[in-house]
Image (spheres, rainbow, N blue to C red):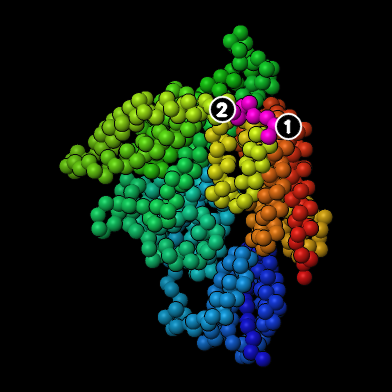
Amino acid sequence: MAQLLAVVGGGDLSTHAVLAAEALRKAAGRRNTPITLELRGKGASGNPLSDAAIAEARAVLLVGEGDLGEARFGALHRARAAIEDVLTDVNAVFDRLGAGAEAPSPAASAAAPPKKIVAITSCPTGIAHTFMAAEGIQAAAQALGHAVRVETQGSVGARDALTAPEIAAADIVLIAADTGVDRARFAGKRVYATNTKAAIRDGKGLIATALAEAQMQAAGGTEATADGPARPAAAERQAGAYKHLMTGVSFMLPFVVAGGLLIALAFAFGGIDAMKPENAGTLGYALGEIGAKAAFALIVPALAGYIAYSIADRPGIAPGMIGGMLAANLQAGFLGGIAAGFIAGYTTRFLNRHIRLHKNLEGLKPVLILPLLATTVTGLLMVYVVGVPVAAVLAALTEWLKGMQGASALVLGLVLGGMMAVDMGGPINKAAYASAAALLSSGVDAPMAAVMLGGMTPPLGIALATRLFPSRFTAPEREAGGAAAVLGAAFITEGAIPFAAADPLRVIPSMVAGSAVAGAIALTSGVTLKVPHGGLFVLPIPNAVTNVTGALIALAAGTLVTGLLVGLLKKRAA
């Protein structure tokens, strides 16, 4: 009987490959469709397809990365899918194969000449998505036969930085980032920019698109085209304001972390009155001065300056930071800083595009004309238009947040905690996180507690479910549960993504419920948090967390809710 074949290759993502193979097997059983599966990875294969099975097959589905042994299938009709596509919607993958796949053409089968690729990945915190995107690009390039070097960027700076000779030798530069990346060093190279999600979801497709659509990078960090002025790539235009805001948040976070921990240490060494003038000269007072009057004073200018940088590149930094300082002085806080950043960025970009000077005078633009004009426009708008009303809004918001109790605290905790689990590092998660981190600069530290505890709950709850309900998970999933626990303890919500992708309709609601419970308990019990990251590792720091007992209760309750719901809703693993 003619049947379907499926070859699943996971590269280094062996657990995901096993999950995808199981999903295909179950879906084929529901459709009464005979299917023969082969799992390949790291040079070895499991249950290799026999020559007889290949001869009798009517189509083959090629899933994932690595060497899938495609040469065996000759003119057999085939379809391709990413592992994530199978885990997300296996029925759609079967529908695609059933509708008929294209036979490979000689042109498509011919091996493309290998390319040299340099890449940069970056996300606001520089933790999970940064490295997941890097792994996606590396695995895809290896499978396609291309040479690749990836530089990862985050709040702690660049790792494995690209060297000038590597950039010079590269055929293209691939940027997969949710934040702004300085492109000055790529002048004269073909550059393609997108977000981290594209690299995580489909590294092969991203590389193919980049090789076809990369555009020449002009000097000064802008992208030049043959038709005229520089403009951003399509993927960057779609990211829009969100990407610019996340760039500002990324550069702001180190100031928040350093300032928050220093203030906490000031109270630890000098008591609750450590920062009063009469304690001048003591260690506690000095630490408080560094944290509150230096690090925290720079939070809003850094936020505004790097929002403007993301929009207008380096010429936007000075107008943005000056606008952010005005926002801080006008008591407009982070809301005023966001407004100043966007005003400065778009003003600078407009002036840069429309001011035309003789080539001998062009050097005056970045050091004289743009800083002067953009700063003047931004400053006047902040002083006369934006500052006062935004300060009033921020004051009202701050008073409400500081005074919330009962129902209002419960609702806000439910919302913030739940948002952290909806997309686990996606836009909804980042919106909640960025808002809570920014509020720290205004002295509002309760939302950060709800956000961090809500973000830790999904992977911890999944890990608990794999122990309480082992029959609901495959052996590779149970093994991956231990890694999820470590990631959850470090406040890396993305550790739950593989489990959510395998069974989203049951797992995601369970995680949202647990995170909402954790956030609600945190806010109603008065838990506050002065630092925006660290997970369980910040709990021992004196005064970093208010009501540590309440925080642990909230985390335990949220983890238990997620673990029980996942175990009750998931079906028994085959």
Q: What stretch is highlighted in magenta?
A: 400-407
Q: Which residue is drawn at 57% across and 80% down?
A: 98
Q: Residue at x 26, y 37 (%)?
A: 365
Percent position of residue 353, x then y: 26, 45
Question: For the stretch drawn in magenta, what is the main secondary structure?
Answer: helix
Please say if 383 is above or below 121.
above
Percent position of residue 341, x then y: 41, 36
Percent position of residue 457, x then y: 70, 46
- According to the picture, the residue beneath numbered tag 1 turns out to be 525
Q: Does the magenta stretch include residue 564?
A: no
Using the image as rendered, state which of residue 149 and residue 73 is in the foreground.
73
**Dot 2, crowdedness within 10 Å: few (<14), some or many (≥20)?**
some
Q: Which residue is drawn at 64% across and 56% down?
A: 497
- According to the picture, the residue beneath numbered tag 2 turns out to be 398
Q: Determine which of the numbered discs, if any, sits on residue 14 in the image.
A: none
Where the N terminus falls, by quadrant? bottom right
Quick one: which residue is furthest to the front in this view?
407
Please say if 544 is above or below 506.
above
Q: Give the SS element for disc 2.
A: helix
How many marks are shown on the rendered structure? 2
Q: Does the magenta stretch include residue 402?
A: yes
On the question of residue 53 being in view, the answer is: yes
Q: Which amino acid does label 1 sit on?
A: Ser
On the question of residue 166 being in view, the answer is: no
